[in-house]
Image (cartoon, grey):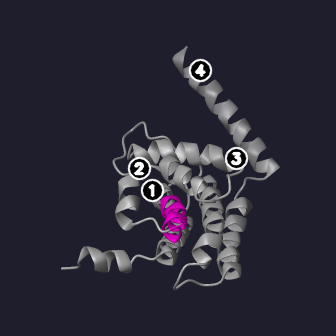
Amino acid sequence: MVTKEEREASTSAFMLWSYGEQFLNASKKLGTPHLPALYLACHGIERAIKSHLRAKEYSLDALIGIRHSIAKALSHARDTGMRKPPVRIAAVLQFVEEIHRDDEYRYPHSLVRAIEVRYFLLAGAWALRAAAPAVSRSPASVSLSVMRYRSTELMQWAESQAPSRQQRQAIARMQKALAEWNERQTE
């Protein structure tokens, strides 16, 4: 059996950061709209933010005490020097907080709320990048430039998944046609 001290010593900030990156990359591979992709992305965001806290000397028990609350983790991280997320990232993080805290993706139901996984990946890439300065200064880590490169690569992929103007117009036309068809069916 692993002792509390061994567990504490074997859970570094860089390990949490790496797990966050791995969860986010697994989410990217699954893609949208798969529920497992969204679930993995939520955990990736959580791990990325908690890696900053671990680098700032938070104990493993303290991190476990935060549970799955993105808002609490981010609040603690901001108190310890993590930069404030941009407005669009903050909006995604608020959405992630609500669904992750309430286990909506862990125990799915017919009314599950979802947005495209690319938004989760943008927020996750931001969290990895924001945690990188603190984590890179912790023992058993890689350089800050490597961590920034790895998070930028994820962010660029997520941004490249945005639908083009033509695709957005086609979706709007399809939604309008579907609404008209549904209306005719109820008459």
Pointer 2 residue: 105
Distance between mark 1 and mark 3 Cα atoms: 20 Å
- Residue 30 appears left or right of 181: left
Pointer 3 residue: 88
Query: Which mark is nearer the camera, 1 or 3?
Result: 3
Crowd rating for badge 3 (residues with CA inside 10 Å; few <14, some 14–19, many 20+): few
Q: Magenta segment: does it hold 142?
A: no
Q: Residue at x 39, y 43 (%)?
A: 102
Distance between mark 4 and mark 3 Cα atoms: 35 Å
Please tell me which of labels 4 and 3 falls first in the chain: 3
Residue type, mark 3 in image: Arg
Please tell me which of labels 3 and 2 falls first in the chain: 3
- Indicate the secondary structure of the residue bearing disc 2: loop
Reply above or below: 12 against 183. below
Front residue (pair 34, 126): 126
Residue type, mark 1 in image: Tyr
Crowd rating for badge 4 (residues with CA inside 10 Å; few <14, some 14–19, many 20+): few
Please tell me which of labels 2 and 1 falls first in the chain: 1
Q: Magenta segment: does it hold 55?
A: yes
Please tell me which of labels 4 and 1 falls first in the chain: 1
Which quadrant is home to the C terminus? top right
Magenta range: 44-56
- Indicate the secondary structure of the residue bearing disc 1: helix
Residue type, mark 4 in image: Glu
Give the prevailing secondary structure in the magenta stretch.
Answer: helix
Distance between mark 2 and mark 4 Cα atoms: 32 Å
Name the quadrant containing residue 39. Answer: bottom left
- Indicate the secondary structure of the residue bearing disc 4: helix
Name the quadrant containing residue 110. Answer: top left
Pointer 4 residue: 183
Which quadrant is home to the N terminus? bottom left
Residue 129 tag number = none
